[in-house]
Image (cartoon, rainbow, N blue to C red):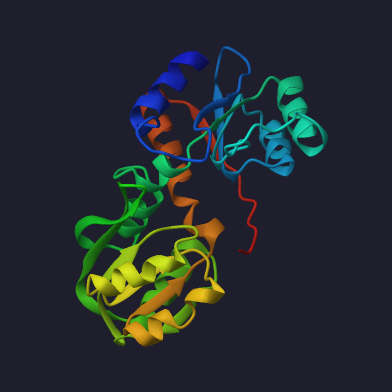
Amino acid sequence: MKRDELVAYLDDTLDIHTYPDPSLNGLQVEGKDEIAKVAVAVDATLATFEQAADVGADMLIVHHGLFWGDAEPITGMMGRRIRYLLERDISLYAAHIPLDAHRELGNNWGLAGILGMTELEPFGQWQGHDIGVKGAFPNPIPLRDLADQIEKELGESVLVHAGGPMEISTLGIISGAAARDVATAADEGLDAFLTGEPKHDTFALPFERGINALFAGHYMTETVGVNLLAKRLRDTFNLETEFLLLPTGL
């Protein structure tokens, strides 16, 4: 498949120009013209690039790209990273907020599907745009069983701040670093809120607002979208894809 055709498909499907985002979403490094294999990963690091080369990827799609707002000199670590890609003719594509928010391929709606939630609605916002999801369980689920299910699906220990009911009927989800949105979930009367990483200054919120907070890891909660996107590329274009697992433990 032509690189530029794949990039155009990704840009359009993920609607990357809709969202204000510190990430430079889209094609960040241009490699070879023809794409036969795509690797997907969470983070753009040298270790990720080395794995992409090892598996023979022509393009790497990541959630966290190389460029975040201000211009950065292509020296030192940044120089080594970009040089590695260019020398191996590997393209790098990034999708940050668009791959959190997408209702078919995104981290948040994808997590809701994995957990078997129903009655899904938008929840939480990023600079005026819907980003997360909320919904219900067909039957109330004990808090500990929900945490165990998340651990089983994502492969990461779940930290639970049990400030709410022990039977969970409703849940809000925003992946990554959205600990402050536990207050948003409480405002909307939800039983629990799921995100990636905790923050010290929000520790008391679940207990004082009467809601449960579950933290399943910034990295692991954001493996969902790239895997859904990889499946879409396999099904739509018969491209070979491979997920690169490089967990941070955070």
Q: Quadrant of the C terminus?
A: bottom right
Task: From the viewer's perspective, tell me whether residue 217 is left or right of residue 15.
Answer: right
Q: Quadrant of residue 238?
A: top left
User: Can residue 66 be seen in this snapshot?
Assistant: yes
How many discs mark residues in the rendered view?
0
Residue 163 appears in the figure: no
Nearest the viewer among 118 and 69 is 69
The residue lying at 31 percent from left, 47 percent from top is: 128
The quarter of the picture where residue 78 lies is top right
Residue at screen point 78% across, 30% down: 79
At 65% from the left and 58% from the top, the residue drawn is 248
Instruction: Please state if 180 lies on the left or on the right of 55 as rendered.
Output: left
Instruction: Locate residue 226 relative to residue 128 in the image: left or right.
Output: right
Quarter location, residue 53: top right
Q: Return the residue found at the far right.
A: 76
In the rendering, at what x and y percent does residue 69 appear? 57, 37
Q: Say which of 188 and 71 sits in front.
A: 71
Q: Nearer the viewer, residue 235 or 164?
A: 164
> Residue 98: horizontal and vertical position, in percent?
40, 40
Q: Residue at x 31, y 87 (%)?
A: 166
